Amino acid sequence: MHVLIVDDEPAIRKTTRIAIEGAGHVGGEAPNAARALKMLEEEAFDAVFLDLKLGLDDGLDVLEKMIKFQPSLVVVMFTAYANIVTAVEAMRRGAFDFIPKPFTPDQIRAVLAKIEKNLVLETRVRSLESELARESPPADLDSTEPATRRALEIAFKAAQTAANILILGPSGTGKSVLAREIHHRSAQHDAAFVTVSCPSLSRELLESELFGHVKGSFTGAVADSQGKVASAEGGTLFLDEIGELPMEIQPKLLRLLQEREYERVGEAKTRKANVRVIAATNRNLAEEVKAGRFREDLFYRLNVITVELPGLRERPADLERMAESYRKFFALRLGKKIRGFSPTVLAAFSRYRWPGNLRELRNVIERAMILAAGEVIELSDLPEEFGARPDVNVVVGARVTLEMLESEHLRRILALCRNLDEAARTLGIDPATLYRKRQKLGLI
């Protein structure tokens, strides 16, 4: 590491530099704040050892200037005026650690080891983020369609507040992507973004997943669990598909929203929570309230700011741009030189209804990129439904066969659902029956 020592005492600078270089790092020296800030402009440093008293300069003020100039800089304060209040203030302003004078070379080496470990972890995190970015297309949160643009404007304006946000829209429209972007634009962006998928677990397991549990509170609870609410402390709790939240858990969520309190399963102790809640659903919650499947008071508590994302077929002006974005992403990922779409493909895209929305668009583009043999994606590279005659309108009441209606309905449900089990539940049949129908209708 390249480490800068800032102290007005030459002996301290020399002693610290010997310890730094003895640990295998490179040391630089600055006798005052002005020289230190100049060196930070001219050279790249990984860490700074900064004295609290620098002649007429206050080291805490210098610390703030350094952090503002280089946010990732690791700054360690050392001083002969050590006390708890000073240490807390230094940490509050961004210091990494605090060493009281007089210090030993071993103390310097211990802090260096801690800094090095921290930098290694940060590098790993950046590497993982880079890998994730390569696995997922960049989020497209722009639109030329007025309704979508207005929805995004509301979302980003509300992001800067602590208000609960409810995101509505069909499956595959990018609700979870928008929720994460709201978090990134919020005051909580440095804290955790934690997702709870409401349809994924039974009522008992979902309650434990959300609020946590104590050891022995139910069969299989072999250890304490803090739960997702605690994991999201200071950050954002994203409740995906909240329309499927069991009625038994809804009062507990209402309490969390209203009183910022909750209890773990099997524990009487009341815990406080500091989380911002974003919820999403593809259901009409107002209709769910009327049907008695969703609490009215919870609905109104969630419905402070509502953002409604339109389906892809309602965004025709955005379709080609999004398809092109996916093409570029998969061209890079697959290492294929495919420069665009044929006019027949773009025409097929424009007349297709996109029941699976952005999720379906991504899957269609990925499939086409894998199958395409030339430099342009052709109609033959798309699934069969894109080659259907545009005048065939497969809807209830149209002059079409029952088999065509069933095939179209199955295809749309499969595009909307995350997996085959969810699709089978939606259709009211068992997974084995769904498999046979897919096989019979050529949907496998």
Image (tube, grey):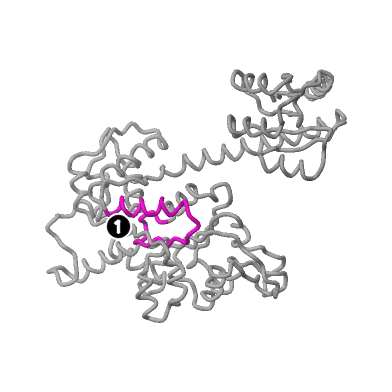
Residue 280, position as x, y percentages in the image = 43, 62
Q: Secondary structure at mark 1?
A: loop
Pick the residue in front: 225 or 361: 225
Query: Is 103 drawn above or below residue 226 in the view shown?
Result: above
Say whether residue 250 is left or right of residue 396.
Answer: right
Residue 169, position as x, y percentages in the image = 35, 61
Q: Is 150 a magenta residue?
A: yes
Query: Is 82 drawn above or below residue 198 in the view shown?
Result: above
Pick the residue in front: 322 or 442: 322
Q: Residues within 10 Å of mark 1 (few under 14, many from 20)?
A: many
What residue does disc 1 label?
A: 311
Residue 114, position as x, y percentages in the image = 75, 36
Question: Residue placed at 36% from the left, 51% from the top?
Answer: 152
Question: Residue placed at 19% from the left, 52% from the top?
Answer: 351
Residue 354, position as x, y percentages in the image = 27, 56
- Please state, as top left, top right, bottom left or bottom right, where the N terminus lies in the image: top right
Question: Residue placed at 43% from the left, 65% from the top?
Answer: 304
Query: Is 331 drawn above or below residue 268 in the view shown?
Result: above
Q: Amino acid at mark 1?
A: Gly
| The quarter of the displayed image where residue 421 is located | bottom left
Magenta residues?
Answer: 147-175
